[in-house]
Amino acid sequence: MAVRTILTFPDPRLRQTALPVIQFDAALAALAEDLLDSLRAAPGIGITAPHLGILQRLVVLELDGPGSARTYVNPEIIWAAAETRRHAEGSVSMPGVTDEVERPAQIRIRYQDLTGKHHEEAAEGLLAVCHQHEIDQLDGIFWIYRLSRLKRERLVKRYDKLRP
């Protein structure tokens, strides 16, 4: 469909909470396609509607290259393991910098597809990290706010040096 402009840090819209999707229609499907096109152009492995400045709870993940894209509408974590793992994270809204974030090693999510049908999915490894990262974004929690203040300040300084 179309590659849209991705908001970049520190745009305040990246800290806003997205609203639940209530209309499952052609416009939602078109937005999901635009998210995928924008994700691939970035490039990245996960993107949310808020990354485009649209406050809807819509996520697209493409972890294993073309053809592996999955769309999640209104995702929510319904269970998280006590065991945690550290994994490098970054964002299409803050390209060029990453840092390790500690999150539950396994989770279970509930979500809807583009037709509104409900599903549940268990996740571990990179998929669990991506779900948690993108659901945080839907909740207005930009990933760097999962870092200590010192690590966050250092990362922002590195990012500022990369920007034109």
Image (cartoon, rainbow, N blue to C red):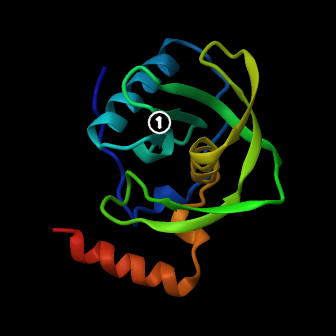
Q: Badge 1 is on which residue?
A: 63
Q: Is residue 90 above or below residue 36?
A: below
How many dots with numbers?
1
Residue at (62%, 44%) from the top-left corner?
131
**SS at mark 1 in the image:** loop
**Drawn side of residue 98 relative to residue 128, left or right:** left
Quarter placement of the C terminus = bottom left
Residue at (61%, 37%) from the top-left corner?
57
Residue at (63%, 53%) from the top-left corner?
136
Q: Quadrant of residue 86?
A: bottom right
Q: Quadrant of residue 140?
A: bottom right
**Drawn side of residue 5 relative to residue 127, left or right:** left
Q: Is residue 60 above or below residue 157?
A: above
Q: Is residue 31 above or below residue 131?
A: above
Q: Quadrant of residue 34?
A: top left
Percent position (x, y) of residue 26? 49, 12
Percent position (x, y) of residue 90? 44, 58
Percent position (x, y) of residue 83? 79, 60
Residue type at the position of mark 1? Leu
